Amino acid sequence: MSPDIKLLFVGAKGRMEMQKVPESGYDIIGLWISGIRRKLTINNLSFPFKLISSLLKSGRIINSFKPDVVIGVGGFASGPLLYRATGKGIPALIQEQNSYPGITNKLLAKRVDRICVAHEHMERFFPKDKIVITGNPVRKDIIHAGEKRAQAMRFFNLSPTQKTVLIIGGSNGARTINHSLLAEIEQIIEAGIQVIWQTGRFYYKEVKESVHNYDLSNFRIFEFLKEMDLAYAAADVVISRAGALSISELCMVGKPVIFVPSPNVAEDHQTKNAQALVEKNAAVLIKDKDARSALVKATIKLIHDNERQMSLKAHIGKLAKPDAADMIAREVLSLIN
């Protein structure tokens, strides 16, 4: 990053960014803001007060920091901050990670100057003349994961001659995925498949207690995996939720993937994300409600179908955007210049 560029992050109080951004060495200011739930709650009743508070604080932030450009990524804090910034005539850009945009970015689309997207056909939601297809940025170590196969097998102490499945459900874990695997774990063991299983912090203890009577010599079970580049490198097939960033990483590493979209997200956007890949023959989709009966069967079938794996790898690899971060940065700088 150029030394003459100064960054200030603005997030929502109580959200993950308030911890992660300072850990990365950047300043962040929190707004008292949250989303609106579909049922009547105390949080919904307090939303008007949160919005007014956040609009006022956003104005003070802008007056103090005096930004040359403002960027929104669809989080709760993006709405009030970009609303105030665009009202003052400050150039603004939003980045939409999903194939189906959230309400914040939909509302901001007419006010901003540029809209960076990760999927085609987003003119259904945004002004066509503002759209730039950039993809989603991914961690740099992911880009070269394909070159680390031998290192990965040594790291996880796995056999390079056996098939390996990677299971990821995010840092908190995916209840349906974990429970679906536990229900059919004997089938997985009998199939002779190696498993790298990130359970998430909410389910690690439950999973470990549920499988302690089985022969798990082919299993590597983790609460959380920091070495995702090696996990991807070791995997022949991946089981994952269908969040936007997970999809971008899987496109980058070019792995056959079975998506189990979370139903507990706004606008069911994970299903729409996964469906966008299924339509290009780049992934397999198992609905959350069908996972308990279908996920393990589909996994075993795919792990033994080399031709299907090769087809999925070829198609998902075409969707990778390795230069996404640079493209977005260039668009931001062009608004300043």
Image (cartoon, helix red, strand yellow):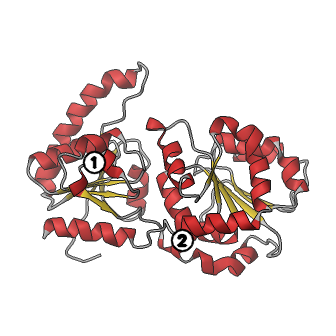
Which quadrant would residue 77 be assigned to in this image? top left
Helix, strand or loop status at disc 1: loop
Foreground residue among 39 and 212: 39
65 to 108, vertically: above or below: below
Q: Residues within 10 Å of mark 2 (few under 14, many from 20)?
A: many
Between 65 and 253, the residue placed more toward the observer is: 253
Q: Where is mark 2, residue-wise?
A: 142
**Would you name the residue on which mark 1 appears?**
126
The kind of residue on which mark 1 rests is Phe
Q: Residue furthest top?
A: 40
Q: How many marks?
A: 2
Say which mark, if any, is on residue 266: none
Q: Earlier in the sequence, mark 2 or mark 1?
A: 1
Is 1 left or right of 98, judged from the image as shown? left
Q: Residue at x 20, y 32 (%)?
A: 52
Callout 2, which amino acid?
Answer: Ile
